[in-house]
Image (tube, helix red, strand yellow):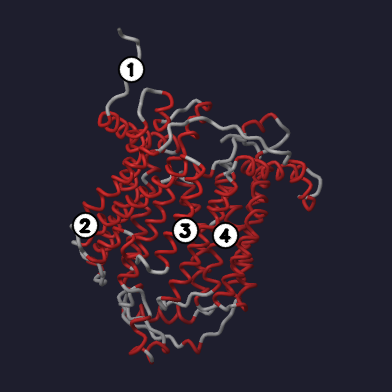
Amino acid sequence: MHNGLREPPNFSTSFRSNFVMMFREEWRQNVDFTRKHHIMMFPVMLALVTMIITVGLRFLTGDAGIDSAYDTIQAAEAQSEKAFTWDELKIGLHLSLFMFSLGMGSFAFIGRNMVSQRASGKSYLLAGPALLPLELPPVYLAYYCKEVTFYLCLILTPAVGGMALGILFGMFTGLSIPLVWVSLPIVLACMLVTMMQGLALSFFASAIWSRSRLGAFLVPIGAVGAGIVVAIDIIPLEAAIAGLHVQLTHNLLLLPFAAICWLIIATIGAHLVPDDFEVKVTTRTELFIPVHRQLFFLGNGQMRTLVAKEMVDVWRSGTLFKMLGSYCVPLLFLLALAWMADFARFPIPFNLLSYAPFLGFFGFNFYSWLNAVDSPDFLNGLPVRVPQLLRAKILVYFIMTTWISILFLILMAYLLNQWAGLLPALLVMIANSVYIVALSGLLMGLRPNKAIFDTQIMAIFWVATVLPLVSLFLLSFTQGDMSLYANQFDQIQAGGIGAESAVYDSTQAQASFGGIVAISLGLLALGGTFLLMLERRWGRAAFEN
């Protein structure tokens, strides 16, 4: 007797249909987020950046022949230590890709979130097993394969395409590009295996974590233990990351074996995801009054109330640690970069001022998080205007992140033993923070995550941030002295873009923070101007997200 119920489809049918529809869903979400031609801006820009890096490989590997006078004297014994080796560059490539994929693979946690978002009128295929006669494993395995395919199209293929453009640029200009055509498919395949590994391990760990409290205890311990095992070289990093191992050993027969292994791990993870989409309700003690009391330095006006409300929203939403993590992880990357520059004796003199400009640049990511916590639509019925809320969010950004940046610069000054540059570095950090966040608020308002994909806004933001960032970055190499760049310009004028030598006597350099201070003060002035312009641009705008 037919009972009117549909039996779940078999594994292969469910996997195939969910994979196709999930890929369409990913495209729909991105089109809903921005326009089609704006979506393509990201891979295009990634390809251009990769092309520039490919052209610059001759400098990274020390093949360009640009030496200082000191290096010329000691070239016999120091040449091998001045630049990155090919193996070090491969390690950097695969390690960064592996860390990125680890961060994007914990999707065993998001089933409950997607179910809870039904109240907004939208549902997602990953939440299908809670609503339809579907089994969990094929749905989650399809989601894993969709992530791999999507990032292959959005990131890996454009990156390798940029390498190809770099080779073509070398062929047309006569520059020596230390890459060959036959290496590109190998690089793509190895990068794909590395990404599959990171996504599979992260998915597997999040599935174990989500099953029980014991799993939530064991997974962090296991992650720390694995990090220690690799750090003390019990298992070398070159062997721990499969794609890196293949690219270093050129044992291409391992590629399909490794890909199948990580697919199996992902399949096991899909079977471990708990069949529980229950939405948990949590309560919190009074937050607003204590936070408002601590903000006494803002006076008793409306701004103090708005800042307190924003800080309570951040804490109540549970995104505080994600937001602080999004700000701190790039700082840890800078620490790793400092270690690599010292370890490889990089030919460019990195110092404390080299890192300070980036601290302000990271503010955009944190500002984006602040606008993603809650929809501000309800404020349309209150005596509040958009410029006031924007200023409140900018104040929240400074209150929550400035102390982290200061501690980071103090730590870097200690590690690099460059205490003399601490005060200028603090000025650079504060100036960039004010400038970047004020610019973000002026250009993008309350919708930075969507507005950044507008071609015109993206172009303005990119030019307005890259020019001062690169200027401060280049000036930091010589503590503000321009002799090195003037000398290199003379060499290029004499020998063309392919000039193979430029001798620079470091004893002639005179450390001068004048240029750096001038740019920083200019950025502070521009940041203040942008804050004043918020009223003109957003004064009549409605609250929307």
Please give the residue where the numbered disc 3 appears in the rendered image: 224
| Mark 4 nearby-residue class (10 Å; few <14, some 14–19, many ≥20) | many
Looking at the picture, how far across and down is residue 362, in whole percent? 54, 57
Looking at the picture, how far across and down is residue 51, in whole percent? 32, 61
Q: Residue at x 46, y 72 (%)?
A: 339
Identity of the amino acid at label 4?
Gly
Mark 3 or 4, nearer chain start: 3
Q: Quadrant of the C terminus?
A: top right
Is residue 94 rendered to the left or right of residue 420?
Answer: left
Q: Secondary structure at mark 4?
A: helix
Is 226 drawn above or below residue 473 in the view shown? above
Residues under labels 2 and 3: Cα distance? 27 Å
Mark 3 or 1, nearer chain start: 1
Mark 4 or 1, nearer chain start: 1
Please give the residue where the numbered disc 4 appears in the rendered image: 360
**Quarter of image, res 53:** bottom left
For the residues bearing labels 3 and 1, Cβ distance under 8 angstroms: no
Identity of the amino acid at label 3?
Val
Residues under labels 4 and 1: Cα distance? 55 Å
